[in-house]
């Protein structure tokens, strides 16, 4: 899994960064930064394609040695929270070279480019809206709210949660068994009903 690192993250961790593989599918890569907000350092992680992500408040220097674990657990929980089927999360993580025990090969790279940074920043800047929270992952209800904020892609406005669902369908729908794509906790979306119009409201 490639993780593109904004300068603030590189300065915080002192990781050496590889060059990004721009030929790879951004659906399988993420961007990360560290933002100072109200006296705490906040780790911000968001996907390069669907731009949904999560926050981890109170990140410290001692956490650097377990950074892979923090990021991978956050991604796994984000997808579960958005009601992506468990077997599809497993397929996704396998495609990212992550094992069942959430251990894998994370490659920390330079960001994919100015466009990727701009889209990431539209999510990361929301970290400044919160303060006084306990250390750890931002609560689920707040993450879901953040991922419902719209952003622009290809001249269209869409929210991150909708785009996440759309892209999982586009990548994995043919590999699904049964008529439904998401877990029962989610709005049930019949296979084949989602079109290329990303502005369609699914929830």
Image: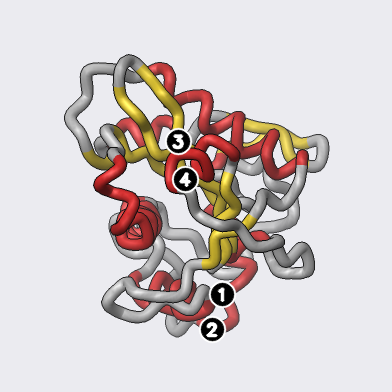
| Nearer to me, 54 or 162 | 54
* Camera-nearest residue between 22 and 168: 22
Contact check, label 4 and label 2, Cβ < 8 Å: no
Q: What is the spatial separation of the Cα atoms under label 3 and label 4, in whole angstroms?
A: 9 Å
Q: Are marks 1 and 4 in contact (CB under 8 Å)?
A: no
Figure colour scheme = secondary structure
Mark 4 to mark 2 CA distance (whole Å):
27 Å
Earlier in the chain: of badge 3 and badge 1, it is 3
Q: CA distance from mark 3 to mark 1?
A: 32 Å
- Residue corresponding to mark 4: 45
Q: Mark 1: few, some, or many residues within 10 Å (few <14, many ≥20)?
A: few
- Residue tagged 3: 34
In-image side of 138 versus 17 (left or right): left
Q: Earlier in the sequence, mark 1 or mark 4?
A: 4
- The residue furthest left is 134
Query: How much space separates mark 1 and mark 2, taking CA atoms?
Result: 5 Å
Q: Nearer the viewer, mark 4 or mark 2?
A: 4
Q: Residue at label 1? A: 172
Where residue 77 appears, as percent x and y from the top left, is: 31, 56
Helix, strand or loop at disc 1? helix
Of discs 3 and 1, which sits in the foreground?
A: 3
In the figure, 14 relative to 148: above or below?
A: below
């Amino acid at each position: 899994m490639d993780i593109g690192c904004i300068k603030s993250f590189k300065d915080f961790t002192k990781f050496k960064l590889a060059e990004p593989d721009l030929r790879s599918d951004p659906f399988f890569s993420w961007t990360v930064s560290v933002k100072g907000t109200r006296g705490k350092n906040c780790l911000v992680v968001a996907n390069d394609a669907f731009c949904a992500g999560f926050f981890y408040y109170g990140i410290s220097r001692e956490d650097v040695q377990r950074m892979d674990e923090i990021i991978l657990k956050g991604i796994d929980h984000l997808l579960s929270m958005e009601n992506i089927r468990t077997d599809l999360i497993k397929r996704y993580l396998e495609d990212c070279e992550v094992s069942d025990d959430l251990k894998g090969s994370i490659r920390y790279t330079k960001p994919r480019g100015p466009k990727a940074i701009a889209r990431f920043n539209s999510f990361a800047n929301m970290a400044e809206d919160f303060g006084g929270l306990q250390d750890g992952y931002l609560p689920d209800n707040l993450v879901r709210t953040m991922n419902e904020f719209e952003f622009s892609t290809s001249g269209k406005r869409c929210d991150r949660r909708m785009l996440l669902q759309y892209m999982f369908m586009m990548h994995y729908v043919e590999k699904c068994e049964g008529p439904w794509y998401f877990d029962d906790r989610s709005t049930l979306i019949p296979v084949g009903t989602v079109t290329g119009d990303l502005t369609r409201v699914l929830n």
